[in-house]
Amino acid sequence: NAGVTQTPKFQVLKTGQSMTLQCAQDMNHNSMYWYRQDPGMGLRLIYYSASEGTTDKGEVPNGYNVSRLNKREFSLRLESAAPSQTSVYFCASSEAFATVSRGETRQYFGPGTRLTVT
Amino acid sequence: GDSVTQMEGPVTLSEEAFLTINCTYTATGYPSLFWYVQYPGEGLQLLLKATKADDKGSNKGFEATYRKETTSFHLEKGSVQVSDSAVYFCALSDLYRDDKIIFGKGTRLHILP
């Protein structure tokens, strides 16, 4: 099992460029998540997909779109990158959405994508 | 809304020292509480959890007790090692709210040999 994989590991964009961050999990998990991590801010949820075919906004969705391509894959797209989107992006997955709250299942995180927008 | 507050870092200790990282929370429901650890260059890993008041989570020598009366979930370890150097995140998730995990800002721990 590879767990949660993300590509690319590093990316530098110019303001206004677009790109898609890819995430895949091989654990047959139903729920997937995208977070961004900024110094002094902890992790903030951008979007999540509680189950295949559904996506919902998290805490900081502006400037992003997502696609739950299938059960394995959940991509994050920046249509017009801005310097404020410079961050480390983490994808995560869990067996189910609600059971994370009860502590019955856990989220598994990918290694992260470090994005710099100049 | 729900929130998590943890002590600011960085925290620098010598090997074998006692560690406490404070975490307090605000929640209107009945949250589960978590500590995640992020080693350099890696994603987050769940370190331990507690799902109800007075539960104690433990793993790899780390412990934290869910204290409802003080709304706290402090992380402790009796004797830290250099390999414990990482960023530690306290988090909560509230089943009766929207199930999302809310993370604290993280505390960087640096252990000196």
Image (cartoon, rainbow, N blue to C red):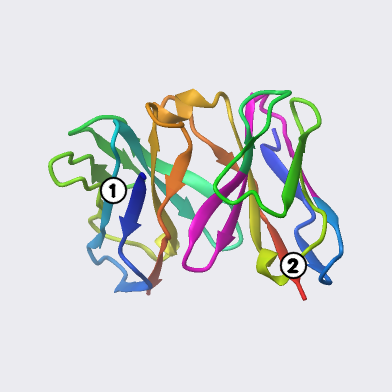
Work out whether B19 lies above or below A108: below
Residue B26 lies left or right of residue B69; in this view the side is: right
Residue B67 lies left or right of residue B24; in this view the side is: left
Amino acid bearing label 2: Ala
Q: Nearer the viewer, residue B82 or A54?
A: A54
Label 1: chain? Answer: B
Residue B108: % across, % down: 42, 67
Q: Residue at x 30, y 72 (%)?
A: B13
Work out whether A55 lies above or below B20: above
Q: Which residue is mark 2?
A: A82
Residue A73: % across, % down: 77, 34
Decide: few, some or many residues near mark 1? Use Cα within 10 Å; few <14, some 14-19, many ≥20: many
Residue A42 located within the stretch drawn in magenta: yes
Amino acid bearing label 1: Tyr
Q: Residue at x 30, y 48 (%)?
A: B61
Mark sitting on residue B25: 1
Label 2: chain? Answer: A
Asked whether residue B50 is in view, the answer is no
Residue B68: % across, % down: 18, 39
Span highlighted in magenta in the image: A21-46
